[in-house]
Image: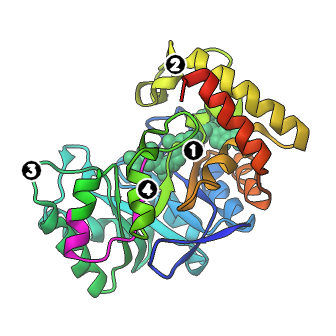
Amino acid sequence: MRMNELGKSGIRVSAVGTGTWAMGGDFFGQIDDEQCVDAIAASLDAGVNLVDTAPVYGNGYSETLVGKALKGRRQQAVLCTKCGLTAPGRNLTRKAIFMEVDQSLRRLQTDYIDLYQMHWPDPNTPVEESMQAMLDLKAAGKIRAIGVSNFDEELISRCMAVGQLDTLQPQYSLLERGVEKSILPFCRKNGIGILSYGSLGAGMLTGKFREPPKEEGTDKRAGFYPFLREPLFSQALRLVEVLEQIAREHDKPTAHVAINWVSQQPGMSTALVGCKNPRQAVQNAQAGEWELSQEELDRIGQALKEIYGE
Ligand SMILES: NC(=O)c1ccc[n+]([C@@H]2O[C@H](COP(=O)([O-])OP(=O)(O)OC[C@H]3O[C@@H](n4cnc5c(N)ncnc54)[C@H](OP(=O)(O)O)[C@@H]3O)[C@@H](O)[C@H]2O)c1
């Protein structure tokens, strides 16, 4: 497994990380609890050390499953969770952060979180108040590193003015490259590690969808990821065909090409990849065993230009 630094935190993390949004059971369709717990364990066995969750995933359900999976092997994991986004909405006040951290620790069956991330900006709370709360949790030993997610440069700069910010978690994949223009260069310049989310385009970049998936029951992913709907879906499918060709040449799954493309971008700490069962978890982890060549990265770059014009 390729390993990287998690920003300036001093923590080393696997190039592929395990994401657990789907394990909340309320957004990616049906789950089986035992398969989810086994998937996290299998990813650790396959060399992944970073596991990402959040209280909002299934209103605590995902964190509870992560806690079960890490029982007896907590030290093997770089455990990442988040605060500031719960069912009623966004809240990054000091009071809410202090309350949420204790709830997460209970569900995760641990007394420390390795990376604690502000999930989405809270327009009603000065980010300086939130950042100070995070620094105080770090001083108290409840968290080891501080991250933000879905923040822009201005908010990141304001956090940095208060204290050490270690990571940013943005949506970043072959299908969503909006952060490439200025946010990623800014993070690289300032030593902020990147955890990409949606690295597989919610499954699209595995080649499993030949038709746009429908929003049905608890499978709501197409509402969050716009390339699962037309007109973006057809463009995405053209890109998938290029990835499939490269995958065939290596005799590897298409998912590996998508995971490696994002994990090989400069400044990346971990490509977060969601899964629901041990088969997916192990397959995704194995992407960290090899790399795309420069010629292959260029081929993908050319395809992006032809399909998206940039
Ligand atoms: N900070 C944020 O705001 C934010 C937002 C989104 C996600 N995240 C984090 O980032 C993680 C990754 O993003 P994501 O889970 O949304 O999307 P993703 O990693 O792009 O896609 C995950 C989904 O793809 C399918 N899949 C995974 N591996 C596969 C394989 N090898 N073969 C076939 N299908 C496979 C699974 O769903 P099916 O089997 O049902 O198709 C899985 O749930 C999340 O789990 C979460 O931890 C954070």
The answer to whether residue 274 of the structure is visible from this angle is yes
Report if residue 159 lies within the magenta region: yes
Residue at the spot 32% in from the left edge and 54% down from the top edge: 119
N-terminal label among 2 and 4: 4
Q: Are marks 1 and 3 in contact (CB under 8 Å)?
A: no
N-terminal label among 1 and 3: 3
Dot 1: element: loop
Q: Which residues are magenta?
A: 158-170
Residue labelled with disc 3 = 124
Looking at the rendering, the quadrant in which ligand 1 lies is top right
Residue 284, x across and y down, in percent: 71, 50
Amino acid type, residue under disc 1 in the picture: Ser
Residue labelled with disc 2 = 232
Q: Nearer the viewer, residue 114 or 163?
A: 163
Residue labelled with disc 1 = 199
Dot 4: element: helix
Ligand 1 is within 8 Å of the C-beta of the residue at disc 1:
yes
Q: Nearer the viewer, residue 175 or 102?
A: 175
User: In this rendering, is residue 77 above or below 288?
Assistant: below
Q: Residues within 10 Å of mark 1 (few under 14, many from 20)?
A: many
Given this view, does label 2 or label 4 mark the residue nearer the observer?
Answer: 4
Q: Nearer the viewer, residue 58 or 246?
A: 246
Ligand 1 is within 8 Å of the C-beta of the residue at disc 2:
no
In this picture, residue 308 sits left or right of residue 116: right
Q: Nearer the viewer, residue 46 or 163?
A: 163
Residue at the spot 44% in from the left edge and 77% down from the top edge: 8
Residue labelled with disc 4 = 185
Q: Are marks 2 and 1 in contact (CB under 8 Å)?
A: no
